[in-house]
Amino acid sequence: MTEKRILKIPEIPRGSRLERYVKAIDEAAETDPSKLNDFFLDVFKACSSYVRSSSLEGAVWPLNTVFHRCATTNEFQEILKNLDEETIEKESPKHPENMLAVCVGDNILARIFIDCECLIETLKRNAVTFVYTVVETYFHEILHGVFQERKSEQEVWNMQFPLIENFLGFRIPQERKKMSAEDYYSNKT
Ligand SMILES: [Zn+2]
């Protein structure tokens, strides 16, 4: 489960993937906002193959992954209501309105749901925040998907940052990396 957070990035490194994505988003927002929907899917695929190619020790890829883009927060919240109690209990966030995504499943089928409406809201701030939030959300949920119960929330948090840095090609501010699962969930595991 990931939540909406704000990131201050001092500067975007030239030639980085972050720069490429930010340009694509700026263009899409200006010319054809429906392209955002493709962006959500394309970036998910890129993050997925990146984690896969990182050959993380102990990672088990589910046979199938279903990636579902909820167009509205209402749709996303409806899905949350139907999750089993154990999942909800484990990742019950302190600020449920900030929840962006969730991963449920097992080694056969992992289902990742994202709240597009909520993610697009971060675009009002700026394209960098939006791109970073989308990528962080994906890495977090993909790691949950491949480690299931074998890694705690905090372990997933710690693992995600070096992967995101390499993937996007920029250094995440230290204060962000120091954040802990405890800051975000009322029932950390
Ligand atoms: Zn989580």
Image (cartoon, rainbow, N blue to C red):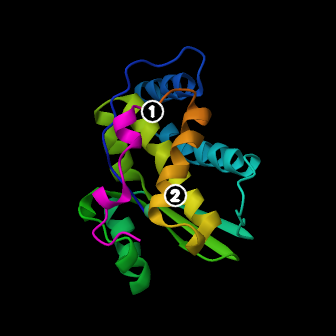
Residue at point 43%, 78% (across, down) = 87
User: Left or right: where does residue 16 sit relative to residue 52?
Assistant: left
Mark 2 nearby-residue class (10 Å; few <14, some 14–19, many ≥20): many
Q: Is 174 covered by the magenta stretch?
A: yes
Residue at point 27%, 69% (across, down) = 186
Q: Does the residue labelled 2 lie within 8 Å of ligand 1?
A: yes
> Which three-letter amino acid code belongs to the residue tagged 2?
Val
> Which three-letter amino acid code belongs to the residue tagged 1?
Ile
Mark 1–mark 2 Cα distance, whole angstroms, equals 16 Å
The stretch of residues the image draws in magenta is 173-189
Q: In which quarter of the image is residue 14?
A: top right
In the rendered view, tell whether residue 106 sits above or below residue 29: below
Q: Give the residue pinned by disc 1.
A: 172
Q: Quadrant of ligand 1?
A: bottom left
The mark found on residue 124 in the picture is: none
Q: Give the residue pinned by disc 2.
A: 156
Residue 62: x %, y % from top left: 70, 69
Position of the C terminus, as image quadrant, is bottom left
Is residue 15 or residue 76 the one in the foreground? 15
Residue 126: x %, y % from top left: 34, 29
In the rendered view, tell whether residue 87 sits above or below residue 34: below
Residue at point 52%, 17% (across, down) = 13
Question: Which comes sooner in the sequence, label 1 or label 2?
Answer: 2
Mark 1 nearby-residue class (10 Å; few <14, some 14–19, many ≥20): some
One can see residue 68 in this view: yes
Is residue 17 or residue 165 the one in the foreground? 165
